[in-house]
Amino acid sequence: MGMMTGIEYRESLKLLKPEVYFMGEKIKSILDHPAFIPHINAAALTYDMALAPEFEELTSATSHLTNQKISRFTHIHHSHDDLIKKVKMLRAIGQQTGSCFQRCVGHDGLNAVYSVTFEIDKENGTNYHQRFIHMLKEVQNHDLMISGAMTDPKGDRALAPGKQKDPDAYLHIVQRKADGIIVRGAKAHITGAVNSHGHLVMPTAAMTAEDADYAVCFYVPVDAPGVIHIFGRQTNDTRKCDCTIDQGNEEYGIVGGEALIIFDDVFVPWEHVFMCGEYEFAYPLVERFATAHRQNYGGCKTGLADALIGATYLMAESQGAQGAAHIREKLIDMVHLAETLYCCSIACSCQGYALPSGSYMADPLLANITKLNVTRNIYEIARLTQDIAGGIMATLPAESDWKDPKIGKYLEKYMKGASVVPTETRMRLTRLLEAMTCGTALVESMHGAGSPQAQRIMIWRQANLEHKKRLARKLAKIKE
Amino acid sequence: MGMMTGIEYRESLKLLKPEVYFMGEKIKSILDHPAFIPHINAAALTYDMALAPEFEELTSATSHLTNQKISRFTHIHHSHDDLIKKVKMLRAIGQQTGSCFQRCVGHDGLNAVYSVTFEIDKENGTNYHQRFIHMLKEVQNHDLMISGAMTDPKGDRALAPGKQKDPDAYLHIVQRKADGIIVRGAKAHITGAVNSHGHLVMPTAAMTAEDADYAVCFYVPVDAPGVIHIFGRQTNDTRKCDCTIDQGNEEYGIVGGEALIIFDDVFVPWEHVFMCGEYEFAYPLVERFATAHRQNYGGCKTGLADALIGATYLMAESQGAQGAAHIREKLIDMVHLAETLYCCSIACSCQGYALPSGSYMADPLLANITKLNVTRNIYEIARLTQDIAGGIMATLPAESDWKDPKIGKYLEKYMKGASVVPTETRMRLTRLLEAMTCGTALVESMHGAGSPQAQRIMIWRQANLEHKKRLARKLAKIKE
Amino acid sequence: MGMMTGIEYRESLKLLKPEVYFMGEKIKSILDHPAFIPHINAAALTYDMALAPEFEELTSATSHLTNQKISRFTHIHHSHDDLIKKVKMLRAIGQQTGSCFQRCVGHDGLNAVYSVTFEIDKENGTNYHQRFIHMLKEVQNHDLMISGAMTDPKGDRALAPGKQKDPDAYLHIVQRKADGIIVRGAKAHITGAVNSHGHLVMPTAAMTAEDADYAVCFYVPVDAPGVIHIFGRQTNDTRKCDCTIDQGNEEYGIVGGEALIIFDDVFVPWEHVFMCGEYEFAYPLVERFATAHRQNYGGCKTGLADALIGATYLMAESQGAQGAAHIREKLIDMVHLAETLYCCSIACSCQGYALPSGSYMADPLLANITKLNVTRNIYEIARLTQDIAGGIMATLPAESDWKDPKIGKYLEKYMKGASVVPTETRMRLTRLLEAMTCGTALVESMHGAGSPQAQRIMIWRQANLEHKKRLARKLAKIKE
Amino acid sequence: MGMMTGIEYRESLKLLKPEVYFMGEKIKSILDHPAFIPHINAAALTYDMALAPEFEELTSATSHLTNQKISRFTHIHHSHDDLIKKVKMLRAIGQQTGSCFQRCVGHDGLNAVYSVTFEIDKENGTNYHQRFIHMLKEVQNHDLMISGAMTDPKGDRALAPGKQKDPDAYLHIVQRKADGIIVRGAKAHITGAVNSHGHLVMPTAAMTAEDADYAVCFYVPVDAPGVIHIFGRQTNDTRKCDCTIDQGNEEYGIVGGEALIIFDDVFVPWEHVFMCGEYEFAYPLVERFATAHRQNYGGCKTGLADALIGATYLMAESQGAQGAAHIREKLIDMVHLAETLYCCSIACSCQGYALPSGSYMADPLLANITKLNVTRNIYEIARLTQDIAGGIMATLPAESDWKDPKIGKYLEKYMKGASVVPTETRMRLTRLLEAMTCGTALVESMHGAGSPQAQRIMIWRQANLEHKKRLARKLAKIKE
């Protein structure tokens, strides 16, 4: 009991038996399968960094429940400083992994459910909040990694949950029993799902009375009966199985390891149920989770961008091009785009506020501004990387050719750029840049924490346009 | 003695006799000349808002020198909270004026000189800091409005100050005397200059030993002998003289009222000299002032944008177009662009730090990010306004036509949009939008607080690219 | 009879007595009033250039009706070459004027009405086309300047013409008589209206049977009884009355001189009526005019941009900044943005086609692409100009200050940049850049030839998305 | 002899024995290896389309040498119409393949060498042009597919060819013999190389007298001794080996199949040598090839974009989202971005001109404008696709999971969107969108036909800025 090291985290996963499929195969042990190892490495690093002296001020916190030192990923924010430190932690870890490290999703789920259960109880006299605190203590004390499972498959986007042709297009309660509930449905795109200890499941949209069975929030262990994980494909995923250099980011992969989670009539005991039909609280829960999660993207993605900018600069050096004025201007553009994202994350944290439960949330308007900028700036940063890196990114032969006894010498000779930089360095940089700007990584920047249109709708709601109109009328001397 | 009201500020200006020229005319009284009135109104509003109960938490502060309540515009920042409140104050005032209110320049100058004089004295054993504190107390106690005069004409941009063909292209010391110094040169684009009580003059660039006579910082009253102000032209400036509605923002104008200040062998007594040849401190002074000033632009400009967005929305309503989806999307874009600027200002404030003097400055990297975003986003916001507003912005006849007994009825009839909105409202909105998106206002967004390339150079210096390279090498498993 | 010189054009205007108002004043003679002179100059130049040997291949044509040499502005296109030469003519003239020269509007109107009257007659057995040809010969033989008057005030944009509260919000027939019709309403934003010989009036939108009275097309002389012109305000318009250098483009002004034309129960004889209730042809007429007019904007605006880019480069030289890498990159960006517009105009011309009447029209999809690019690229070009030009664009004092015997010497000294460039040159460049990038000129780029959303709607209609879907299904091996 | 069908093309490849390596393996038969099949399919389709009645007007031409009907890919342009038809052919084929079909590179090489050899001979009295015509007839008569091999590895970009540490960083002549020359070096990123019949090798940069051995142009059969091909990796390339649906574009792949070609002391007989030391013609050859190749990108890429836009629209329909206003606006943006590229290609074709040899080339300025737009618009189109498509693009499980007897039912159920669209359709669309917007495809848009900075340099050279300055001086009334 207490905080785990990365090694202890790996050990803890060995005790679990999640049902996982990938490319038509049932996976016996994710710890031993190359498709999963980089994602486990990234998660393990979050454990080690929580204990590392140079990072612990950011990566650990003191539990308001137990007063013990805990991983910040299990902490409930209680100040602006907590909100800001989260962002700085995400940037610091992102700089090390160059990829998603997964744990922020569950963290944001814990914070959202914490505050909303408090308010449900206050309104309805239920006892969800105490149940949740009990589970939260378990999470903190055992340093568990929890996925945050929100997004439903959604079926036809033009129809509400209760109007779908397939009622399971959104996860819902199929039975209420004395000892718990039975749920059916699925959650899609769930980051870190297969290497978590359990899933915190939340509704995905505003609900009406008709949708009450869809307003359900609960926790299940990753290996609960009926919980099935189908791991998604990623760009160049099979390189994890048969390459080293060609992976680009061999250690940590390119994204968070997203899975589709099927809930095939899963039983959840009451002590793990945190919302059960209180449809009017579905939207607040979604909004709080979304705010917390959108806040993150200017932290972690800026960390990734730091590494990417460094790699791009090294790439220019490897080609002797670092002295060109246009290279410098493009690197400045990349820094500008990245730091703008960081500014947004810091600002929404700094402008956060306390909720009735005493926990803190980021400013919702500015958190949505943050994420909407991410959906553009990260693409532009990738474009600039690909501009500087050159055509080699699209045509570099395989590392196995370079290692080949007959033709390797040709690659060693002709893939060389500036004479002071080894050919291997140039190849490694090419593959790292490829990994960090490839399709899946960009799409994750676009749709993680919600699609751009979701952010735009929240911006519209939060923008207080009536106040702006009043200002304008006064300036133009218009009588209302 | 003590804080002034707007009326008292106007009264105080009557006691001064600055030498001011505009359009070939020597101005007898700026208080009575329509070219200056809106700018005086905007400055006066900063006085009134400092005393207004609903704003004073942002607009006033407690002097660390006298412990008295003072205008925040004369305050030396001593905390993150001070830095953040400055930004919020600027947004709040900008929402009311829809235009530049001028006082932030001197405020930033006071803060920059305060901290740098402390460091010069520490290094050289001089007593500039005490001199400056003495003057600062005067400023605080009498609530003076001080311009910040930094930008030199610069002559040939390819040459350093000491290498110019005309040695006066940068302001410099021409004589050192027992009781003070004599200076010659000019300062360009000085906001609020003619309606300030005095000028805080600072060097504009990094200097070398050869440029020592150009490393000079001092204060002069606005009406000191030899100080001459030539007021710049603004877009549609003569409308201030002969129109009401056509001004667009009759009350507060379109920019800050910039002037060229000539220093024709001006005497400055030693007690008002704060740097005199310490060339190695010229760059720190420039950098601190620039940082403080670039921090601002996501505050005030977001305030202006708030009013502009409101006016644009009203304009859409006046045309019956507010229900169109593309109008809503464009308004969201405008909010997104504006709030991104605000995020940057908040973030560089939140990430500021204490200097040796104990005063606080904003984070320089993020402050430069802020301003660089302003040079783009404000233009884009203006473009969206002009998109929504329609061709009427380019072709609306004069208010005098609308008031004309013969043809006014035609304008009343044909300039009407949606039937519920009076024609006058539509005309007033058109003119307000015109005033807020016209040439001068945009150029000010581009070049105020330094040109984009100045920000890019500072971003390059501050970006710590070596650290980024180290992160990349680690990820790519490259041995250094 | 025959082509006129610029001087003859001016003489011909003296014979007309249009009713014109500007700034509350009834204008006796537009030829003698400074508000109109630059616009007359620009129109006059089109006459001179039609006769100039170095331009006549582009600026003149051979009438298909009379086989005489005519101004291209009165020509009906009969080949791709005609369409392309129009674009090249517009660029060539725009390079000389740096401003709108007005005549393309009527030219596009003539071409649109020519082809549509042919089709109405074919469908309905009417004789509009012969009537129109009769008038067209007059226009060609006397080299008349015709405005193209399409845009109605529109009132509430959410309502169709026939549903407006004020039935006159769109121009309509109020009476059909034996000898002609009486019309009432107004046309807004009409370029070159006051210095044209007559107006070609067209409907502005698709119509239904209910709107039949609004489906009207006709010609009136500029001084027909009941036709009243109210000239719109422009940015810095009063500088035309009291300045020289400060005008920026003293010779040709900043835009085309737009006016609101009131039709206060105007009588139009039948020989000048070209559509009278054929509502189903209103949309084809609008679409053809819009296509022809949107085609233009990559011609004339590229011509203006050529001059603007040259002026911006000279401005950089005047400041000694021409050697900076970022200046070169920005100039390349400006060329890139401008030539992209030109490509679009050339392409829609090259891809044009013959209509049933035998006349040619540009490709509608690509013409709309052209104009939509103009609404962005011209703004971006202006932004880059303002970036390079510096803060002087917002703060330069008046020419009267520079000419002042007392203070002129200060401006002469301190407004000087690089020593080889006279101060006057720098001031002239500043004012030219200001004139070309100011509010009205940009708004004209946005809304001239229709607002961006109008182009987007036409793009949607023309994009043949069903064909694109079929291509996709085939590639994805999806059975329909 | 004569034009080949796709099947005949495949047969012809069987007669060749190129030395090809991929992923550490020597390839016995590219026709039988899945890594190469889609690229061969795309090339084969160009043969079939040249004979297809509905396409032959665009895809075939009449030889000016033999007067026979030939593939347009072996034709020398002799009119504007030829230039325009090339662009239309590329769009038409791109619509069918959704991927690169490779043959334009050799086509552009043939045209560039044709005109430059004419000029070398004229200047120097050599007989390169006749040699070339002899080879060209072979190419036309046998309908050969020729790669265009220009880009050298380049080593250190800061050094000229003759200054490199490794003299082979640029391909060069190592020996001149009685019967021919021996060359050494490599050519990188060569499209369609392994499935071509031969390579047309050209120099890559401007040369000086010192670099004369690098000024070499010649033809070699694909299986000449010493010619070695190392095939580059592509995004998700191994899916070609083990998947069907997951390939996305199973038939035609994602790019052109680029290879590094090693020339390990290859002998070239004189009749196949077209430049040998005439260094002053290296730059004209590069410029003509670059112009011809940059012209293409608004043709083929618009064709690809047509299919991509269609697929994106289908994807929105598959999710029930096609009615949302923001989806429509994004599709309009995609069309706008794509058609702008097409406009540029058409315009540079339409504005092309005849060379001394009588062949035609596109306008160089506008061709560079075209390609520079491609390096941005294609990325933006991809971003919009990924926006509309949703997170499924990053997380969709493998087709083998969907086909799995145990878990396939879950994917069938939960990957379903709108009820009328089969799950398989949605999966196929997801994979097609993934394939068309993934890393390699985008990088190819960036760097194919030269990197953006290469285009910018040519724009700078071609922009005639002195003329623009003259226009500006005239407008501003500045005496030179």
Image (spheres, coloured by chain):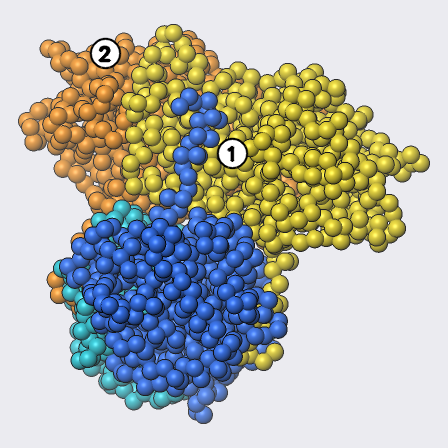
Chain colours: A orange, B cyan, C blue, D yellow
- Numbered disc 2: what chain? A
Q: Residue at x 22, y 35 (%)?
A: A288
Helix, strand or loop at mark 1: helix
Q: Is residue D363 visible?
A: yes
**Which quarter shows the C terminus of chain C?**
top left
Write down the residue under mark 1. Answer: D95
Q: Residue at x 8, y 24 (%)?
A: A126
Residue B369 at x, y percent in the picture: 41, 53
Q: Say the numbered circle drawn on residue A265.
A: 2
Disc number placed over residue B357 in the picture, else none: none
Q: Quadrant of residue B287?
A: bottom left
All told, the count of numbered labels is 2
Tell me the quarter of the picture where residue A74 sits. Answer: top left
| Chain of the residue under the numbered disc 1 shown in the image | D
Camera-nearest residue between B326 and A109: B326
- The kind of residue tagged 2 is Asp
Looking at the rendered image, the disc whose residue lies closer to the viewer, 2 or 1, is: 1
Extreme residue toward the right, this view: D178
Q: Is disc 1 surrounded by few (<14), some (14 to 19) or many (20+) residues within 10 Å?
A: many
- Asked if one can make out residue B438 in the rendered structure from this viewpoint, the answer is no
Q: Specify the quadrant of the image occupied by residue B375.
A: bottom left
Please tell me whether residue A383 is drawn above or below residue B62 in the rendered image: above
The amino acid sitting under disc 1 is: Gln
Q: Are marks 2 and 1 on the same chain?
A: no
Q: Is residue B316 left or right of residue B183?
A: left
Side of D465 where A465 appears, left or right? left
Q: Residue at x 51, y 46 (%)?
A: D341
Q: Residue furthest left?
A: A125
